[in-house]
Image (cartoon, helix red, strand yellow):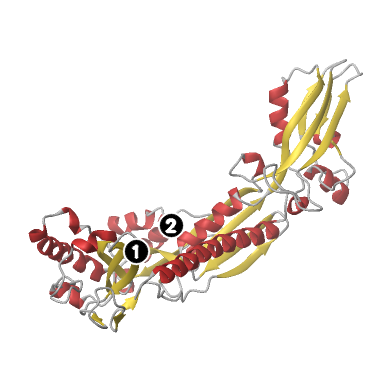
Amino acid sequence: MHPSGYPREHRAKIIAQFLQVTCPVAAALAPRPIALHWVTSTEALQMDTDEHGRLQQPSLPPACIAASNVQYWARIGTLRYGANNVRRLALTHTTRRCAYEGSSLWKAPTSPCRAMDTYRPNHRHPKITIRKLEDDYAEFILSDTDASVANALRRIMIAEVPTIAIDLVDFENNTSVLNDEFLAHRLGLIPLVSDFAKYMVRPFEDFAEGQCSEVEFSLNVKCTEGRSLDVTDLDLIPDANHSVVPVTQALMKQQGGSVKPVVLLKLGRNQEVKLRAIARKGIGKDHAKWIPVATAVFQYVADISINQALMDELTEEQKQDFVNSNPHTATRNAFKYDPATRQVTVPEPEAYAFDEEVLKKAAELGKPGLVDIKQRQDTFIFRVEGTGVLPVKEILWQSIEILDGKLATIQEKIQEWETKMHGDMVM
């Protein structure tokens, strides 16, 4: 709400109208706390003051006073009283009029006002429950948090966990049917074991002792037979100074010859390809070849409640039709009908796909309130499939560390801002 754009004689009325409309809406969202900004920045200088020169809070309509979850904020920015006198202050106004110490315009408020740098504690404690964990696949439940955190974790797993991929190719000879650019692109998409990425830096980052920015591979294959020759990622020869190899080569050492290699191209008789490939550290934000996962998705858990009174009005055949209307497999269905008890239950809410077919069936049966389905906003089921460049467990750990680092940076900047604000404040 920015009242300074209106004539002074109309500001009080404009603010009152603003609060009259917004307070009932905010109260409907209880108990979630709502902040209404009624003045911001240096507009406070143009607001009405009392006989002592103190800032006046607008009168509150009854709907605002009744809304216990609403807070009223006055954010006062840089205030100038002379060339060298800059004062900053941030105050939080509650539904009652603030009492100020002394007669100065910007003295600190006493109760019931609170300083803006007083934060509400976060009572949520996110938890991860592992349901299945393999080198290339994981399924876990993230609970006691909200969708913003779940989606942030998912996006970090896709786009910000660093891996290693071929980024530069120097061709010495290529007489195959594939042009250099096409072959270079295929080489870039070969998954490389990326455990070594933690010891590497990106080309534009500062180097530290023991770190490097690139690793090298070579490929030199010539077809001398009368039939075509497959060139695969097994033909890539890594530099002996590092442990970075194609994922297929690593699996071959672990499992023997049962792994099918990635075919890069086919060479005809007397065709040759000779090149030097340089692999670098990167993240999925820069190019898809650095993405460490094939899929990283989460699903909401359905919160399903059945109106038993309406369900009891249905015949056994109708109950079975209702259960069968939900898309299901031979072994999984969110709903189940038990002929012995004649009850419809929800044994597997995770199997519900939010397709609303049961809601349509309920309406068709003349029972529109038969079932109520909502998405739980605090529990999410993750399924992550890796490409082999990193174990899925390592991808998850690095994602959590990256997210924690981002939050720590935000907290640090806020603390710097608070320190500067308190240092500039003249009481």
Q: Is residue 143 left or right of residue 204?
A: left
Q: Position of residue 390 (x, y in %)?
A: 72, 52
Q: Position of residue 22 (x, y in %)?
A: 20, 64
Amino acid type, callout 2: Asn
Q: Position of residue 404 (x, y in %)?
A: 58, 64
Q: Quadrant of the C terminus?
A: bottom left
Q: Is residue 344 visible?
A: no
For residue 86, the mark is: 1
- Disc 2 is placed on an element classified as helix
For residue 324, the mark is: 2
Q: Residues within 10 Å of mark 1 (few under 14, many from 20)?
A: some
For residue 247, the mark is: none
Residue 33 location, quadrant: bottom left
Between the C-alphas of marks 1 and 2, the distance is 71 Å
Residue 204 location, quadrant: top right
150 up-or-down from 217: above or below: below
Q: Residue at x 63, y 67 (%)?
A: 130
- Disc 1 is placed on an element classified as strand
Q: Residue at x 76, y 52 (%)?
A: 208
Q: Quadrant of the N terminus?
A: bottom left
Q: Is residue 319 left or right of residue 413?
A: left
The foreground one among 292 and 82 is 82
Q: Residues within 10 Å of mark 2 (few under 14, many from 20)?
A: some
Amino acid type, callout 1: Val
In this rendering, the label closer to the viewer, 1 or 2: 1
Q: Residue at x 66, y 40 (%)?
A: 289
Exactly how many numbered labels are in the figure?
A: 2
The foreground one among 167 and 352 is 167
List the single residue furthest toward the front. 83
Q: Is residue 119 left or right of residue 166?
A: left
Question: In the rendered structure, which disc, 1 or 2, sits on the residue that comes first in sequence?
Answer: 1
Q: Is residue 237 visible?
A: yes
